[in-house]
Amino acid sequence: MTSQMMINQGIKHSPILPIGPKPSQYGIDPALVKKRVAELPGMCSLQLSELFPELPPVLFPGGSGALERLYEVAMEELRKVDMSFIQPNHSVNLLASHHGFTLLGGQPYAILLKATREAILEKTGCKNIRLRAGVGMRFRETEEYIKRYGLEECFGQGKTKGVAPIDEGIAIETEVGTLYGIKSVYDADWIVHCHHTDVREVHFHRQVDKAVKPFGMSYARIETRSTYHQNLGPRAANFTARAIFESEFVQNKFAFASFLNVGPHGVIGVDADNDLYAVNDRATFIGCQLYGKVMTLFGKIGECIAVLDFPCPVPYVFSAGVIYANFAGANQDLYDMEGTPLPPYTWYTEAFYKKDGTPLLGEIPPLNPAIKMCVHNYAWTGYPSAFFSDHIPTVVVGQEQSDLFDMEPMNIEYMSHSVVAKTTESAMDFAYKVTGTDKVIIFDGAMGGLNCSQSLADLLIAKAPEVSEEVEKVLMPKWFRQRGVDMSILETLSHR
Amino acid sequence: MKRVTILAKVDPNICTGCKICEKVCPVYAVKVSDRKSQVSEPDCRGCANCADRCPVHAITMVKRAEPFTVGVDVSRFDPGEIKELCAKAHFNPEQVLCYCVSVRAEEVAAAILEGCDTPDKISSRTGIRTGCSIECIQPILRLLAAAGIPLKPDLNGWQWYGQTVTAWTLPQEVKNKYGSRGFYFEEDKALLEQIAAIDPAQ
């Protein structure tokens, strides 16, 4: 055994327990998920804090008492926020989004919501505090989360509501004309924006105004969301969110932002501020530096089998904080606004494929050619995903999952491009034989790191140091310059 | 073009007649009469909006005994007219407008040339906006407006409210004000125009 192999052996660990299957109308019965790919022979895990030792320490995951500590940290941070304008007889809507509940098992985000409610009550005496939880495309999703995390018990009966973009709307006059929000999001004297720094869809927001995005998405009506995804272009899209947030209507209601500071390895802390743009600049730093390293590292993978094994729609399953949709674009630098006008996957790109299956524009990059096959062991419906199975050979485990996709309005054609395997083992055997690679990356939401095959772990260990240096010295200055973010934000953040 | 495989089914014992299903159906296939929701089976395009917003879970989606396909045969129309209408709305004819159902601009243009003059008629005819029902409303409105058809939202429903800003109507002062914050307004407009101008046959 060489010295490098011995070092690698010290860094490679037993697989991390994946996030468990969850009951939902969007996924199969958890009892049908018989095997997780991380359990199969040849799999191991890597801790992100060992791959990138410079990552900041995390509050969660952190053993027993970590969630209680997170609650205390949230309360400390929230007590510093100015809430003097909220009167005891006022009403306040805490605005939440579905994605927060998919992070690290969902409890940390639920804790943030509970702490934010408690801090408002404590500081202002206001009792009429409600929760409005927005969704992506799964209109029942946050209703499920409200139940799962006991939020109605916390907020009180009738004070929680899952809201959807087809619900009754409200016109909002902005600098670019009328846009539309969801009426019940704004049916209070004050709104509090409860979100997180997880990057999730870099292909859509490109880490520009990420902290503002829900105003143009999960808090918005279909007209606004369609503006984002169809009317402005791939790098101007997220302006829709800023236009709404800047409106007089929203500014008159906006109280403060309460953010879970999340990195790819866990919850770093809580950031609460009356100034959303200050939060946004700090979130940009987290998104570029911490997540940027993992994304850049994943871009160094030359060949692999990608495994989907997480209770989320196909594009949103996680590995080390990176979603499958972004791994499908990891052959390009998604943060580079000038070098990558159109990511390999984003809806604008998807729109630009002709009937014969070729792109309208020669420069459109293909989906990550490193993904030789996708094994869909467990993932949900609720997001149009046929583009992935059309472009990446896909094996779906279990007839029940296949049937579920065939019954779902957004995925009528997903199975037209996929094959079905009876078991997890047979799906993986098939993938190994057909692709000839033993490199496997598992998108199963493993907390603190990632699950993968031994051979892929060796590659990632070897590449991590050079990636870290490349991001710090070459890429970050470019990414910040393109976003008009002052590099001194690094100094501000280090003080927090 | 869409393969319609599922159908909304109402349980009248649970339905309270609240009419939310009526307001969210993109093709007006659900109506409430005598305080009970009723689905017109031939008209339902299987988007599940009614099932997903029913506050008492009275509606479920079921497999159709006889699935069918909706769609407009683009080849029946003058390609020049299709191209002209798409160009006016800044779309390439082969551009996908609906990410769920893969309906392209040329099919929506053909539906308009065939006589569809509202978003719901276009959805019913082509299947567009019957998947997620969110993301493709603006392209439909843009193509209708490009055809000179007045847009009249239903004041009693929540199907859609109105047309919004595009890369071509974004005020210059807004571009100047925010251009340095990472928004590539002009570059994206040029990209969209480049796409619209491509001849797919080339």
Image (cartoon, rainbow, N blue to C red):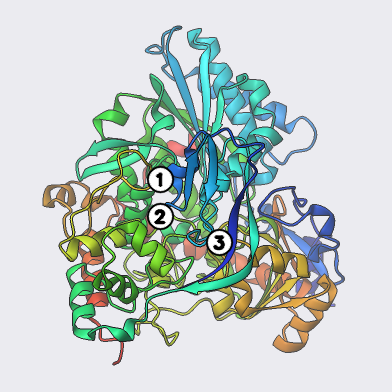
- Same chain for the residues at labels 2 and 3, yes or no? yes
Q: Where is mark 2, residue-wise?
A: A205
Relative side of B187 to B158, left or right: left
Give me the chain letter of mark 3.
Answer: A
Q: Residue A409 carries which label?
A: 3
As displayed, is residue A150 above or below residue B29? above
The quadrant in which residue B155 appears is: top left
SS category of the residue bearing label 2: helix
Whichever of callouts 1 and 3 sits on the residue coming sooner in the sequence is: 1
Q: Where is mark 1, residue-wise?
A: A213
Within 10 angstroms of label 2, few (less than 14), some, or many (20 or more) residues?
Answer: many
Residue type, numbered disc 2: His
Relative side of A333 to A423, left or right: left
The quadrant in which residue A230 appears is: bottom left
Instruction: Where is residue A30? Give x, y as percent.
Output: 80, 53
Instruction: Where is residue A297? Give x, y as percent.
Output: 57, 67
Q: How far apart are marks 1 and 2 (CA)?
A: 8 Å
Within 10 angstroms of label 1, few (less than 14), some, or many (20 or more) residues?
Answer: many
As displayed, is residue A285 above or below residue A450? above
